[in-house]
Structure formats: structure tokens, C-alpha cells
Image: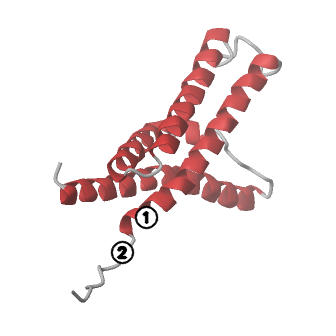
Amino acid sequence: MNPKLKSVLAKVFALVGMIALWAPILFMFLSAVVGSIISKTFLFDYFLLAETSLVIVPGLVLLFFASLLAEKYSKWFGWGGALAIVLLVGSQALAFATGLSTGAVPASGPIFITVIAAIVLFNIVVIALAVLSILLVKKLFRRQPEAIPTAE
């Protein structure tokens, strides 16, 4: 692949992926602050990142491809993205299989704790990868020092 095209694709994928991860995170915190002020009680929807997974998962895929093209952090985005998807799908599958998602099983006990723990871990992984996406974008857009001509 043409190095210039490879660089442009890596930058575009990294920027779009970074925005896809940070937008739901910032919205989660913004809605918590505004909702808490309006209701005069602490509100925080930690399910929001799982609910916006249709934005987050493509963002993770784009960041993985950007990291492959840039040859930076690819293992972090690969394993981290895979872990995030496994936690998300696993928590939803467990909730559905046990009847927790339909209300057939009460929201208590070890199954409930496992589902909530998986969602919280998913959030932590997504936030960590969002921070890493900033580092990737910084490296991709860093100016390369020009070569100093040597006297021959």
C-alpha cells in the first residue's frame, strides 16, 4: 500500500474511532452532571456505554485498523477491543439466558452481580481505550523532524 495513503487512512480511522469512543463517554458524564443538578440527587447511568455500543464497537474496530496501519498500540487495541466486546456480549447473553433481562429473575444475587460487574469492566476498558486513542492520534499527527543535511 502507498505509504501516503496508509498514513491518511490511519489518521482518518484514528480520528473517527476516537470520536466514536469519546462522544458516548462525554455524554454519559454530561447527562450525569445535568441530571444530578436538575433532580438535586446524584444520577449516573453507567449502562449508557453499553446502550451506545452501536457507536462504540465500530469505533473500536476503526481504532484497531488505525493502530495496525500506524504499527502502534495494535496489541492494546486488539486485545482491549476483543475484551470489551466479550464483556458486552457476555453480560447481555447471561442476562438474557437467566431471565434477568426480562424481569423473570429478581435483580439480586450472584447472576445480577456478575452482569453488573461485566458492564462496569466494559466501561473501564472502553475508557482506557479512549485514553489510548488520544495517544495514538497524537503520535499520528506529530510532525516528523526534518532530516538535517550533512556536509559531505
Q: CA distance from mark 1 to mark 2?
A: 9 Å
- The answer to whether 151 appears left or right of 139 in the picture is left
Task: Please identify the residue farthest to the left as the structure is shown.
Answer: 2
Colouring mode (rainbow / by chain / secondary structure / one colour): secondary structure
Q: Nearer the viewer, residue 135 or 26?
A: 135
Instruction: State left or right for residue 33 relative to residue 106.
Output: left
Front-lying residue, 57 or 65: 65
Looking at this rendering, what residue extends furthest in the right direction?
Answer: 109
Residue 139 is situated, as x and y percent measured from the top left of the image, at 43, 64
Above or below: residue 7 compared with residue 102: below
Tell me which residue sits at (59%, 21%) in the image: 90
Residue for point 73% across, 31% down = 117
Task: Look at mark 2 in the image and give the residue it sits on.
Answer: 143
Q: Quadrant of the C terminus?
A: bottom left
Q: How far from the left and from the top, in percent, is residue 52?
A: 50, 40
In this view, the residue in front, 117 or 151, is 151
Residue at 35% over, 44% down: 65
* Element at label 2: loop
Q: Which residue is mark 1?
A: 139
Nearest the viewer among 67 and 22 is: 67
Q: Amino acid at mark 1?
A: Lys
Residue that lies at the very extreme toward the bottom in this rendered image: 151
Point out residue 86 in the picture as x, y percentages from the top left corner. Answer: 55, 26
Q: Quadrant of residue 74?
A: top left
| Position above or below: 134 against 56 | below
Q: Secondary structure at mark 1?
A: helix
Residue 13, image x and y in percent? Answer: 33, 51
Q: Is residue 2 above or below residue 88?
A: below
Amino acid on which the number 2 mark rests in the picture:
Arg
Quick one: label 2, few (<14), some, or many (20+) residues within 10 Å? few
Q: Residue at x 29, y 79 (%)?
A: 147
